[in-house]
Amino acid sequence: MVALVLIVGVASASSAAILVRLCDAPPLVIATYRLGISACIVLPLAILRYRSNFISTTPRERLTLLLSGCCLGIHFVFWITSLFHTSVASAVFLVCTNPIFVALGSWLFLKEKMRPVLALGTAVALAGAGIVTLNDLESGEHGLWGDLLALAGAASLSAYLLIGRTQRSNLRLVPYITGVYSTAATVLILLTLAEGHPFTGYSRQTYLLFLLLALIPQILGHGSINYALSRVSPSIIALAFLGEPIGSSVLAYFVLDEAPTLLLMAGSVVILFGIGLATWPRTAVETPRRGVSTGRL
């Protein structure tokens, strides 16, 4: 069951970059609609069925949830913007270096022990990111800026994962993603208003793409990650989602006619190898810690 959930999640997440690139709207607006629609979908269910779960949370837990949602919103600002400055392949491979940032953050801030293989994998993945960036130097500052934005998206996604890591032990899946999505959507709405971007006036196709972004990569893709996270090792999930940039690159080739260069492919392979090495599981399936949700909705 979990394997099927991960397959569906990876396939769903792979569509995100393509859907974003097809949208005829500013990156901030795209991110706002993606998270806003997602929040509106899960909010009624959370209110009707999980109100008591929200009420039982402590002020500190609510603050943590808010911080986690802010980081998620910032992640989408960086990553979606990067897709308009560099190729889909570069953006998705660089943003998928987030397991490296999570590992480094766990070592620096949570005082978790860094295994030698983790340090080696981190170095290899960062070298791969350097190769990808070197490839995009040929396209000038435009491509390099996109690469930096994608890496910033990876770092902010890692902060979201690290800050919210304890929340799944106290909140079920639906109230957890409701709180995070609602916070992220609020942050994005404020940023969009501050930038003066309109929320209306886009084509019907773009509004349809907004809806698809919310339903497929967000609800189905991210929902699958959160469901599986409490049932199998995070290392297994990290390895499974290495398929996302590959799927996105294939879709970009057929839908957007973006053919990756040899240097980009070489850098991407090095990144995947480094992340795989760093997150290689010591056990295939871990027993959930005491008090951690076991995939309940």
Image: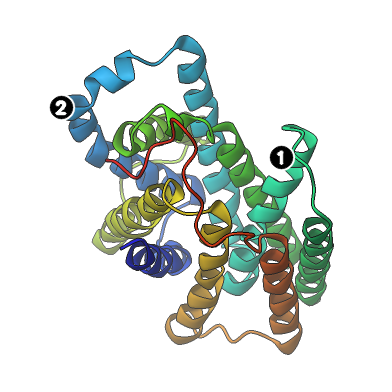
- Image position, residue 256 (x, y; %): 47, 80
Q: Nearer the viewer, mark 1 or mark 2?
A: 1
In the rendered structure, the answer to whether residue 265 lies left or right of residue 43 reads: right
State the residue position of label 2.
48
**Amino acid type, residue under disc 1 in the picture:** Ser
**Residue at 37 percent of width and 52 percent of height:** 218
**Residue at 72 percent of width and 67 percent of height:** 277
Label 2 element class = helix
**Amino acid type, residue under disc 2 in the picture:** Leu
- Image position, residue 212 (x, y; %): 29, 59
Residue at the left extreme of this rendering: 48
Label 1 element class = helix
**Residue at 56 percent of width and 68 percent of height:** 242
In the rendered structure, the answer to whether residue 186 lies left or right of residue 172 reads: right
Please tell me how crowded label 2 is: few (under 14), some (14-19), or many (20+) other residues with Cα within 10 Å.
Answer: few
- Image position, residue 20 (x, y; %): 44, 61
- Image position, residue 11 (x, y; %): 39, 70
State the residue position of label 1.
106
Quadrant for the C terminus in the image = top left
Instruction: Pick whichever, 171 or 154, lies toward us.
Output: 171
